[in-house]
Amino acid sequence: MPHDHDHHDMPPDPALRVKALETALLDKGLVDPDALDLIVETYAHKVGPQNGAQVVARAWTDPAYLERLRTDATAAIAEFGFGGRQGEHMVAVENTPEVHNLVVCTLCSCYPWSVLGLPPVWYKSSAYRSKAVIDPRGTLADFGLSVPKEREVRVWDSTAEIRYLVIPQRPEGTDDLDETALAALVTRESMIGTGEVKAP
Amino acid sequence: MNGLHDMGGQQVYGPVKPEENEPVFHEEWEGRALALTLAMGAYGRWNIDRSRFARECLPPLVQVSQSYYARWVAGLVDLMRDHELFDEADPDRFSPDVTTPDRSQIARLLGTGGPSLRDSDRMPAFNLGDRVSTIIQNPQGHTRLPIYARGKTGEVVLYHGTHVFADQSASDRAAPPQPLYSVRFTARELWGKDANAKDTVTLDLWEPHLVSARD
């Protein structure tokens, strides 16, 4: 339950607060410094949208893989070794000429960490979380994207532990590109639904 | 609990402003805040639903004025105190008898995460294609049924099996799992006649959020 709130108890500067907290928890032996470093290294360097881009590129080039992704996305994504925290239960949603998918979490900032890394500030912003469901087309316009009104904008509000990965449409004129070259074209925004993949 | 965190449909926050070439962390403390939150969570004294509820219970001024990771830290401070691990205001207050998770344990934890799927004999009450309505409710505790989707009618489009029921599990870890569905609502059902006729919003909802719609 919420505690009684006084206006004067605003928290201290977060940089100082975190420093003090880390020092105290280390002093008490409640955290292991190597474990903390591992967490920061993992999300700063190892996990990121380059993971999801590989999944998308394979879905574009390997019909059998796409079928596995449709049947059980968590297992298909695990073929790359991607999984774990905030990617435990994955669903892949495909953009088509009829449907444009857009993923949001209006209640917090749920996001598929295992394939996209940590969410960008805009994804966590009040503006995005409030607007994506009531004005998805205006939200897309904020990213310079326009979807014809006959095409469904299908918003997914991540209200449980299911995490959604958008499979954007493969751009025209990329028939001669291999999986690696295709993966390099796939942006984070295109896998959330606020962007599209452009041919080089 | 109805609160500032339940943002869907609010119209006061202006346009979305993406940042070019955004770094993973803007300042070093953000990474440390993430690390402390995950490392302390590894003791298992609270689950993800309880930790979300802790952030929802932060004072309104903190919620609107503090950045994402600053809110995480504020939530973590409350969780550690309420679960008798550490009191920021009185560091000597608790001396928990615990084994500190080391690097390899944390690595394993990141690798497996916290799946919410649970085995259960429970058969789902709804089938794909069923018309369902969401209940109208305003619980004092945690809920994952947002205000904007209460009392609305939609269609079951996916079934995910039985999952930990967040609304109960935030306060009762022994709560039984519940069937989890994706339910699709037309934008017009949610927002009225000015919404685009083709557009939809799909939410993940547990069976207790839903009743059969006979229309």
Image (tube, coloured by chain):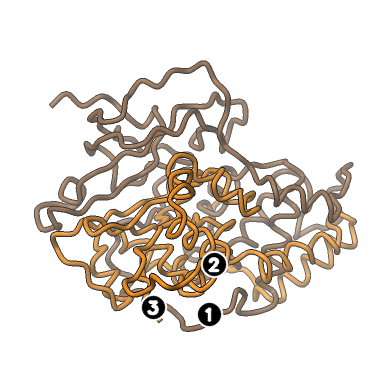
Chain colours: A orange, B brown
Q: Quick check: A167 above or below A2?
A: below
**Amino acid type of the residue that numbered disc 2 sits on in the rendered structure:** Pro
Q: In this orientation, which residue lies closer to the viewer: B200 or B137?
A: B200
Q: Say which amino acid is labelled 1.
A: Glu
Residue that label 3 marks? B17
Q: Is A90 left, or right, of A156 in this rendering?
A: right
Q: Is residue A161 left or right of residue B16?
A: right
Q: Tell me which residue sits at (36%, 46%) in the image.
A: B146
Distance from disc 1 to disc 2, alpha carbons, whole Å, reads 12 Å
Q: Residues within 10 Å of mark 2 (few under 14, many from 20)?
A: many
Q: Foreground residue, A76 or A10?
A: A76
Mark 3 crowd level (few <14, some 14–19, many ≥20, 10 Å Cα): some
Chain letter belonging to callout 2: A
Regarding mark 2 in the picture, which secondary structure is present there?
helix
Spot occupied by residue B105 in the image (x, y as percentages of width and height): 82, 49
Q: Mark 3 falls within which chain?
A: B
